[in-house]
């Protein structure tokens, strides 16, 4: 029962992603760092820009549906 409730809480966002331990996949994802580097460069160059006043990444136009803080937190979670 507790495991099922924990799955639902994680799906709803009630978890500490930075405190979880993730296993490494081994040799299955050799090109993963390269693919992620290209993805990050593409996203930053097309939709995000650095704002000195804000001190972080912000979207270039109002119609972009990306948030710099959420994007950075997601990257940190993947590369942890």
Image (cartoon, rainbow, N blue to C red):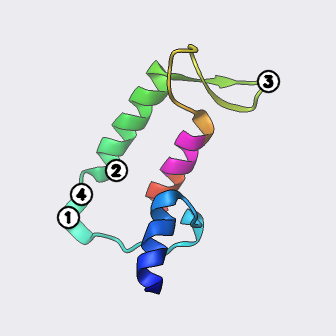
Residue holding disc 1:
28
Of callouts 3 and 4, the N-terminal one: 4
From the viewer's perspective, is residue 48 above or below residue 32? above
Q: Secondary structure at mark 3?
A: loop
State how far apart marks 1 and 4 are (Cα).
6 Å
Q: Secondary structure at mark 1?
A: helix
Residue holding disc 3:
53
Q: Is residue 73 magenta?
A: yes
**Circles 2 and 4: CB atoms closer than 8 Å:** no
Label number found at residue 33 = 2
Q: Is residue 47 magenta?
A: no
Of callouts 2 and 1, the N-terminal one: 1
Which residue is depicted at the point 47% across and 76% down? 5
**Circles 1 and 4: CB atoms closer than 8 Å:** yes
From the viewer's perspective, tell me whether residue 6 is left or right of residue 28: right
- Comparing 15 with 47, the one in front is 15
Residue extending farthest front: 1
User: Residue 1, how many percent across, how many down?
Assistant: 43, 86
Label number found at residue 65 = none
Of callouts 3 and 2, the N-terminal one: 2
Q: Which residues are magenta?
A: 70-75
Label 1 vs label 4, nearer the camera: 1
User: Residue 39, how many percent across, how many down?
Assistant: 36, 36
Q: Secondary structure at mark 4?
A: loop
């Amino acid at each position: 029962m507790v495991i099922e409730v924990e799955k639902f809480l994680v799906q709803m966002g009630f978890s500490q992603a930075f405190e979880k331990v993730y296993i490494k996949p081994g040799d299955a994802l050799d090109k993963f760092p390269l693919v992620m580097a290209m993805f990050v460069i593409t996203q930053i160059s097309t939709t995000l820009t650095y704002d000195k006043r804000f001190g972080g990444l912000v979207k270039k136009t109002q119609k972009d549906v990306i948030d710099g803080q959420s994007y950075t937190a997601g990257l940190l979670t993947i590369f942890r």
